Image (spheres, rainbow, N blue to C red):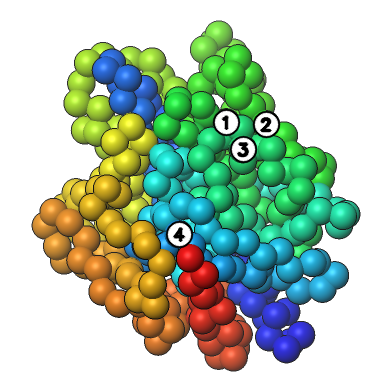
Amino acid sequence: MKTIVKNLLLLMMLSFLGTASAVACTTFVLKADDGTLLFGRNFDFPAGMGHIEINLRGAQKTAFVQPPEKPMQWVSKYGSVTFNQIGREFPYGGINEAGLVIEQMWLEQTQYPAPDERFGVTELQWIQYQLDNVATVQQVIHSDSFLRVSFTSTATLHFLVADKQGNIATIEYLDGTMVVHQGEALPFPVLANCPYEVSLDYQKNKDQGSEKEYSPMIENSSGRFTKTAKMLQEYQNQNPVVYSFSILDSVAQAGSTQWSIVYDLTHNEIHLRTAHNRNIRNLTLANIDFTCSDTWLFADINSNTQNHPVFKTFSVSENLKLLQQVVAKVEFLQSIPEEAQRAMAGYPESVVCVQ
């Protein structure tokens, strides 16, 4: 079992080491003239396959961690829709019934907290925990008092979080401590692949005409940050969903932008398109039954549909198939043992309805 867990951690590490060289993700929050709140996200990666997962309320879960971490257990309070690539329960991002959105991006400088008395969960399951349990940005931040991203996590991430009330925050783990930017400390609700302060410094210097030189990585990441911030400032009474997609188009990376997602937090809606299906498809959370049952639903993010994703019944075999497709597509994942892939794909079988 220890070998399986070790290989699973290796799988996650390799996934995001690949992200370091191939991903240039960008996220932002746009407040429309009528008060509607939009959250945009580009996902860039060598592999574009994925599942849209419907996660139910009233489901009991036990954290997927290894000793010395204590396995936290919880029952989901909210249903959610998430975007997953390495299996159900390990999302890259999503939105819950309360209108909370969380998305992650790679950040090389991330250092997660050292082990302490708090519970620890892996970096992607941290996203699912928050979507399962909380409604506001402040509650996400408060969870740091009893929950941390585990030191066993190998994907170095930071997060942009927003809620229906219009609260927005970046969450980073620098030198082992949660660092939050919100309110006046968050002049631009944008995040790319540099620490927020680095991108803010870059934006200020460029705005002032500075000739300061930066590394190619900072130029790319903080350049996207600056372009996005400028477009947010220039927004004037356009269709907010259309304008959000235009922002995502402006910072897309040729050949690697796989998913473009726009969340409408005000109306609990999702609009998405992919490199494999350029039709903008729409999903309204109010039309989804999140009552816990033995039947879980998912949709192929690239399915050839015009207006709406088509959902079907989840199975471990489909979960494993997705993971195997990603491994086959991404060269540096192809040494991952089959037993490790099967263990991660089978993890959702441990989730049970209690309400």
Q: Is residue 76 left or right of residue 261?
A: right
Whether residue 326 appears in this view of the structure is yes
Residue with the mark numbered 1: 169
Q: Amino acid at mark 4?
A: Arg
Which sits in the foreground, 50 or 329?
Answer: 50
Query: Which of pointers 1 and 2 lies earlier in the amino acid sequence?
Result: 1
Numbered circle sitting on residue 57: 4
10 Å crowding of disc 4: few (<14), some (14-19), many (20+) = many
Question: What type is the residue that disc 3 sits on?
Answer: Gln
Residue carrying label 2: 180
Q: Categorize mark 2 by other alpha carbons within 10 Å: few (<14), some (14-19), many (20+).
A: some
Residue 109 image offset from top left, x and y in percent = 72, 45
- What secondary structure is marked by label 2? strand
Task: Measure the alpha-carbon separation of dots 2 and 3.
Answer: 13 Å
Q: Are marks 1 and 2 in contact (CB under 8 Å)?
A: yes
Residue 61 percent across, percent down from the top left: 59, 68
What residue is shown at x 32% (from left), y 41% (from top)? 268
Which label was assigned to residue 139? 3
Whether residue 214 is visible, yes or no, is no
Give the number of the disc on residue 54: none
| Picture residue at 53% right of the left edge, 35% below the top | 136
Q: Secondary structure at mark 3?
A: helix
Task: Measure how far apart labels 4 and 2 are at the Cα level.
Answer: 28 Å
Disc with the residue nearer the chain's start (1 vs 3):
3
Asked if marks 2 and 3 touch (Cβ < 8 Å), the reply is: no
Image quadrant in which the N terminus is located: bottom right
Foreground mark, 4 or 2, reads 4
Q: Considering depth in this image, is 260 or 101 the residue closer to the camera?
A: 101
Q: State the image coordinates of residue 129 (x, y, percent, origin top left).
A: 58, 55
